[in-house]
Amino acid sequence: MTLKKIRFFALACIALFGISGTAQSIQNKPAYHVVFTLAPRDQELLHYGYAQDFGILNPETGGVVVLEVGFISSPNLFQVAPDGRIVYWNAEFDTTEVVDPRSGESVWLESMIDKAHFDLATGGDTVVFEGSDYASLYLTDLRGESAALIVDDIYVYGPFLVSPDGERVAFRGEAINNPGQVGLFIVNTDGTDLSRFNSNPDEFLHRWQPNGEAVVMARNRSLYLIDVETGKEIFLVADGSGVRFMNDEVMVYRSLRGNEEAVYTINVTNLERRILFTGPRSWGLFPSPDGKQIVYSLTREDDPWLATICIYDIQDDSTQCFDDLNMTVYGIAHWLPVN
């Protein structure tokens, strides 16, 4: 039976329904808030990469409220489901937890106890996680009551990515019975049709194309789009990271220039590029679901352990930054649907 803990956070619920952390009414309720990881109250834990609790930012008012969930050991890996539930690794109980910011209800995923590495399908509640042996992948959902084996006997290297529809998983791996043969694999989440669609050992998976037809991977910092059915490659850019898609055709990425970076969009069909902005090196690039804004974070100049959240408006070509949020520099910021 799945363990459930009911928590009701008045401030969090207030924030999501349109009142700031100062309990003042919001006249223009935004479609999305921003959720991020807070620095632990014990500064020594901050130096070890921990976060403690989530902050929820209303970008219209700058109001922030705290969602108390305990210690977060991988603050750069939490994900947000389409319905707004937050999925993260709870370091206090060594399990993956799903928390609903609206109701305060949280669920421990029993099938994922002691399993810290997971990926969530962007289009639903399919969750894939890595086995303790680092040579297997399992399928579960946001109830986490049971899990089904997808694949075993393959060492999984680096991130594994669930397709947007939750039907397939792409990963970089090496078959235990065929050592030395490292490549990119794809398999259905029911465990069928395992195949290797690329055999270059020096590749890193970044992101699925939203239509599920291809993945973006990096080879020596160059980005390529690979068709998962045919293995055909399309060269995109010579230097790129932080890949996120805004729609089926347009993705956003960063290109480093020493201690600074430039953030671009590129159309993966016609390869047209557009520079959006330049600035200091940032963490995370998350386009809003409506494609109008991008949220990212910067290391604070006055404290290298804390971060500033910035929101870039694509239409207005303007940036708004929020300081003094007590965000851990190890974390990332996600968009959180209000309704």
Image (cartoon, helix red, strand yellow):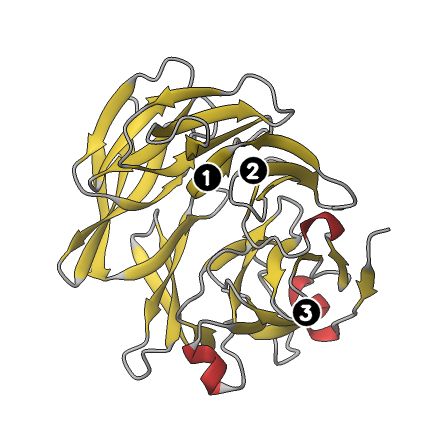
Q: Which amino acid does label 3 sit on?
A: Ala
Q: Name the residue under label 1.
A: 156
**Closer mark to the observer between disc 3 and disc 2:** 2
Residue at the spot x=25%, y=35% of the render?
223
Residue sitting nearer the eye, 287 or 150: 150
- Which dot, 3 or 1, sits closer to the camera? 1
Q: Quick one: SS at disc 3?
A: helix
Residue appearing at x 62%, y 44% in the figure: 82
Q: Nearer the viewer, residue 163 or 152?
A: 152
Marks 3 and 2, how far apart at CA: 37 Å
Residue 12: give its label.
3
Extreme-left residue of the structure: 258
Mark 2 closeness class: few <14, some 14–19, many ≥20 residues within 10 Å: some
Q: Position of residue 75 (x, y in %)?
A: 50, 64
* Mark 3 residue crowding within 10 angstroms, few (<14) / some (14–19) / many (20+): many
* First reached walking from the N terminus: tag 3 or tag 1: 3
Q: Nearer the viewer, residue 157 or 48?
A: 157
